[in-house]
Image (spheres, helix red, strand yellow):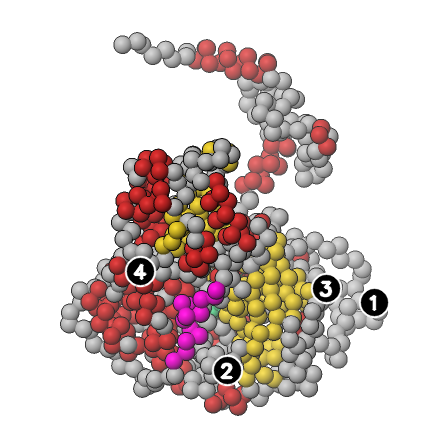
Amino acid sequence: MTEKKTATPNEISRSADKMALSEPPHTAPSGGEWHQSGEDGAQPLTTNQGLKIADNQNSLKAHPRGPTLLEDFILREKIFHFDHERIPERIVHARGTGAHGVFELTDSLEPFTTAKILTEVGESIPVFARFSTVTGGAGSVDTPRDVRGFAVKFYTKQGNWDLVGNNIPVFFIQDAIKFPDLIHAVKMEPDRAFPQAATAHDTFWDYISVTPESMHMVMWIMSDRTLPRSLAMMEGFGIHSFRLLNSEGKSTFVKFHWRPKFGLQSTIWDETMKITGADPDFHRRDFFEAIEAGQFPEWDLAVQLFTQEEADALPFDHLDPTKLIPEELIPLRVIGRMTLNRWPDNFFAETEQIAFCPSNILPGMDFSNDPLLQGRLFSYLDTQLSRLGSPNFHQLPINAPKCPFANQQRDGHMQMAPQAGRVAYEPNTLAPDAPREDPAQEFVSAKIEESGVKGRIRPESFADHYSQARLFFLSQTAYEQAHIASALVFELSKVAQTSVREAMVGHLRHIDENLAVRVAHGLALTPLPPAPPASVPIKDLPLSPALQLIGKAKDTLLGRVIGILIDNGSDAATVAKLKQAALDAGARVKLIAPRIGAVKLSDGSVIAADGQLAGTPSVLFDAVALVLSAESAKLLCKESVAVDFVRDAYSHLKGIAINKESELLLEKADATSTLGITSANNVEQFLKFAKTRQWERESSHRTLA
Ligand code: HDE
């Protein structure tokens, strides 16, 4: 055995000395990433005080191998700034993705409001929208089962309007005072700091089991709504009722809805878990790539308008945020369109520092008495102070109104405005040009008479916790109902406390006895636990098919991504034809190959793949095509990633196109049904399959509850 030679301390220091001599501090290290000032037209690198920096690679030392000097203000400034790069993340909705865009009104609401954004048809209003998960930290994954935030800041000429909603039209609780408890229950458990970004644990379900008002929301979060395929394939909801005020001060209630042009689409739970492993940034990347490709995510903005009298006639209280108003009762009126078309220049400056406040409304708008909304009006301003650290957070470019704004608020941490002049108060006589109030102007609150007994009292009209949960569940297709039942079994199986599982099944009996039986069976829970007392009788409401996902699927490929598996020898004409047809239909296409750099097709042409097979599984696509040579197909039958590629596409109910030579792989993956599978030459049929999932295939793959 040869002895391993180690360098002596002297040898090491000698070579370090040599380095120091051969690389004088003022030259760039090799690698070419460093530019001297002015070289190649690059901007000079400076300190924050504007001093040009000659050496950004070596700190100032007493001698080449000596200690670093405290006087190195360049080093200290750089490290000081770095040490403070992070700001507190949002306590909820920490992980988010944002983009710039425009909103354009198509239908004026002039009879109802003086808000110009809702009356001036055709005006292009800049917006920034941020989508988020609720539960996880900023570094968590994009795809947990979770509600998604859907927050939009409109920079209007009358000031900023923030519509801060979710992708689900109801919420867990009826009163803001409960919010910290709800969030503490759902976040990772405080003693063990797990699970991250998951509802499937004891404290969440323990809290829910004693909070019957959350049952309607529970039905939504257990549905595939919490597994969106893309941020651009989600609906958005303002949830609460707001008020619109017209020029006579007359008030009309309004609920806001966003409807995606790309249609609604969700992933399947097994697929979602695999996506999480394959690409923790799945939604962020998808959104980025769609915008880069010019497939701009787009939503219609719709409203439900109703008077006090109509509100009084509803079979539930619209001020209760655990209730929705079915479209079948008050139809949606589409009034405008939002298009997101520009990725931020800097994630931190824009997506992280944007500060939404539901209290940011416009003239011609006002709040309702929804007790959850009322609490939110306090919370968001308060949270910005602790997150952004200054009452001047509105001066950050992403938060500043794009219309003039002026007042006598002064100073404060990080004041950016050079607030000139002697007068910092209003009213005054010394500064005639200074900003002043104008009673004739713009924002006035709705003149609403309030009367009643002051107290911590929940209205009786908030007492029905089960009827709308039942309405939601019964309105779903059979596939969606099975997904809800299975999600409940999955989640409650992660709950160690049997009493909590039992309590939840008890609640389900009020929603639908059959659902309770299915979940109890999935948990091996016998006998069926008793239902808790319900405060008021449960009503059977007319079903609302508008609450479905599958029933509402759109006939479109917009925003979808098709994966084509190729290898050396793949038929060039088939690949080209599939690719072009998918692009023409509005999809994006990625070519996947066992090796990424160069694939030699049947006609001798050489192309680069977009993804390497092992790192680009089929869970990342909406539909897949296999165009392999006979030789490749045979070889790939021995590659588990290739077999999984097909097996997963098949069991996740995706459309599959396949050429004759690749059929071996179908057999290897046990893909026995022909539903949703077609020849790679039948492009039209493949694209039809690609628009949806082959739901009929599902029962042959997994046992749903
Ligand atoms: Fe929020 N919520 N929330 N929330 N929320 C925050 O504000 C809060 C609620 C929503 O992309 C925080 O800036 C309370 C309902 C979104 O930046 C915080 C209550 C709905 C976002 C806060 C609610 C939402 C937030 C954390 C109960 C749907 C992300 C950081 C009264 C309509 C916005 C921040 C973004 C963020 C408080 C309930 C949506 C702590 C107290 C209901 C989309 O202020």
Marker disc for residue 433: 1
Q: Secondary structure at mark 4?
A: helix
Left or right side of 179 for 509 = left
- Mark 3 belongs to which amino acid? Cys
Nearest to N terminus: mark 1 or mark 2: 2
The mark found on residue 330 in the picture is: 2
- Under mark 1, the amino acid is Asp
Q: Which element carries disc 2, helix, strand or loop?
A: loop
Q: Nearer the viewer, mark 4 or mark 2?
A: 4
Q: Amino acid at mark 4?
A: Arg
Q: Is residue 232 above or below residue 13?
A: below
Residue 379 place in picture, x, y as percent: 52, 66
Left of 397 or right of it: where is 659?
left
Separation (CA) of disc 1 from disc 3? 18 Å
Magenta segment: 543-555
Disc 4 or disc 1, which is closer to the eye?
4
Q: Which residue is mark 3?
A: 403
Q: Position of residue 66 (x, y in %)?
A: 55, 20
Q: CA distance from mark 4 to mark 1?
A: 72 Å
Q: Residue at x 42, y 61 (%)?
A: 692
Residue 451 shows in the view: no
Mark 1 burial class by Cα count in 10 Å: few <14, some 14-19, many 20+: few
* Residue 372: percent from left, percent from top: 47, 73
Are discs 1 and 3 less than 8 Å apart at CB? no
Secondary structure under badge 1?
loop
Residue 523 can be seen in this image = yes
Q: CA distance from mark 1 to mark 2?
A: 48 Å
Q: Is residue 645 left or right of residue 705?
A: right
Q: Which residue is mark 4?
A: 697
N-terminal-most mark, 1 or 3? 3
